[in-house]
Image: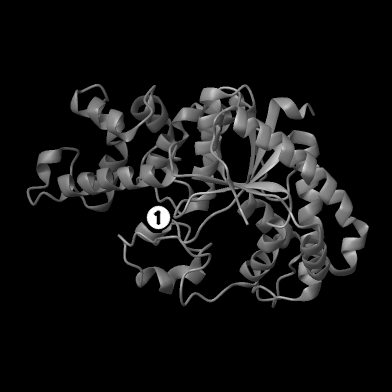
Amino acid sequence: MLFGSRILCIDMGSLTAQSYAAVNVKGADGSATPYSAATSNRAAYLFFQSMLGLSTEHGAPVMVHDKFPTRKLNQYPGYKESRFQRYKDAIENLNLIDPELGKHEAPPNAELSTYQQFRQHLVPILKTLPSMHAYAYGEEADDTVFTLACSLGKVSKVKPSVYSRDTDMMQICAIPGCRLILKKGSAPAHVVQDYEIGTQYGVRADQVALYKAFLGDYGDSIPGMPRFHTKYVISDIIGDRTTVDQVYDAWDAGEIAYDHWHKGWYEYFEHHLGYALAEDLAPDGSYIQTIERGKGQAFINEKLARLDPDCNAIYEYHSGDYVKFEELYMNLAGKMAHNLPPVEIWNKMVRYAEIIINTFQKDGIPISVAD
C-alpha cells in the first residue's frame, strides 16, 4: 500500500463492536454475558490485530469516534432503538436544545451494556497511541467521516478509505477518489464498487439516502414509506433525483405518474378500507391526511439516512505515552498482549501518525494537540 496516496478513516464503533461480538458468547436465552476480563482480553487482541491489518492494507488510520448521545438519536428516539436501548431513559430527560448535547461519553442515568464497558476500557488506550482522532460533538461517526472525506476531496490528492459496517456510508463513494471498505456480518470486508450499489439498491451512491427515505433501512430503524413498490420508487419516484424536495417538486409539477406514485396507497385503501380507486371517495380527508403523513415521514427518513458533509469536526493529535500505553494495553489484553508486542504497535502508529499530520498540515485542515 502506498501510504502517501491514501489514509484510512476507521469507524471505531464498527471496529469495536465487530471485535467484541466475535468473542462475546451469548447465553442460551440470547442475553449478553457479563463483562469479564477474559472477554476483554480476546476482544482487545482482535481489535488491535484488525486495526493494524486494515492500516497495512488500506492506509494510515484516523480513528473516528461518536460523542453520545447524537442529535439523530436525541430527536428521533426510535432511531437505532435496539442498538441504543440503554440510552432510552436518558434521552427522555434531555433538553432537545441543550447546547451541551453530546458533550459527555455516556448519557446520565444510562446503564452501560457489557459492550459499552469494553469500549470504555479501550478508548483510553487509543488515546495513548501517537495517532489522530476525529469526532464532532453530538454527531455520529458517519457524519464526521463524511465531513473529513469532503474536506480532503476539495483540497487534497490524498483520498480517504473508510472502514465501516454501515451501508449509509455508501454515500461516500459519490466523492471522487473515496472508497468504502464495508464489513457486513461474518463476511470478509471488501472495497465496495459502484456497480454493487446499483445491484443492491438500483441507484447511484449519491441517491442512497433518497432510496432509504422512501424504502427504509431495517438495520438502522428507518421505517420507510409503507406499501411502496420498489420498482416504481426507483424508476418513477427516484429517477435521476437526489433529494426528497426534488421528488415532491416533480410530483407537484405532474412529472410522476399518479398510479405509480400512489400504487401502494391504492391497494391500501381499496383492499383494507374498502374505498374505490379515486381520491374524492374519502370525504373526511383521511386519504389526504395519510398521504401527508407519508410525506412527513419521507423527510424524517431522509434526515436519518443522509450524511452531513459539513459538521463541526475536531481533529486531535495524541503524541503518545509509551509507558501508559503498555500498562493499559497489558491490563486490558492480559496474556494475549504478549502475542502482539506493544512496541510493534507503537512503532507502526508513530509512522502512521506522521503521514496523517503531514497530510492535514499540507491541506490546511486544523489539528489540535491533545494533552
Point out residue 336 in the picture as x, y percentages from the top left corner: 88, 64
**Looking at this rendering, what residue extends furthest in the left direction?**
283
Q: Where is residue 202 in the image (x, y as percent from the top left)?
A: 50, 28
Up/down of 334 relative to 311, above or below: below
Left or right side of 201 for 62: right
Q: In which quarter of the image is the N terminus?
A: top right
Give the secondary structure at mark 1: helix
Q: How crowded is mark 1: few (under 14 residues within 10 Å), some or many (20 or more)?
A: some
Q: Nearer the viewer, residue 307 or 289?
A: 307
Image side of residue 86 versus residue 78, left or right: right
Task: Indicate whether 314 appears above or below 211.
Answer: below
The residue wearing badge 1 is 71
Q: Nearer the viewer, residue 290 or 311?
A: 311
Name the residue rendered at 90%, 68% in the picture: 335
Q: Tell me where residue 225 appears, x and y as whole percent.
A: 35, 45
Residue 158 visible to the viewer: yes
* 92 left or right of 133 in image: left
Judge whether 137 appears above or below 115 on screen.
above
Which quarter of the rendering shows the C terminus? bottom right
Q: Which of 145 and 39 is in front in this view?
A: 145
Question: Which residue is depicted at the point 78% across and 45% down?
Answer: 349
Residue drawn at x 75%, y 39% as measured from the top left: 352
Tag 1: amino acid: Arg
Residue 176: image quadrant is: top right
Residue farthest right in this picture: 339
Q: Where's residue 311, x and y in %?
A: 43, 42
Indicate the colouring scheme: one colour
Residue 180 in view: no
| Number of dots carrying numbers | 1
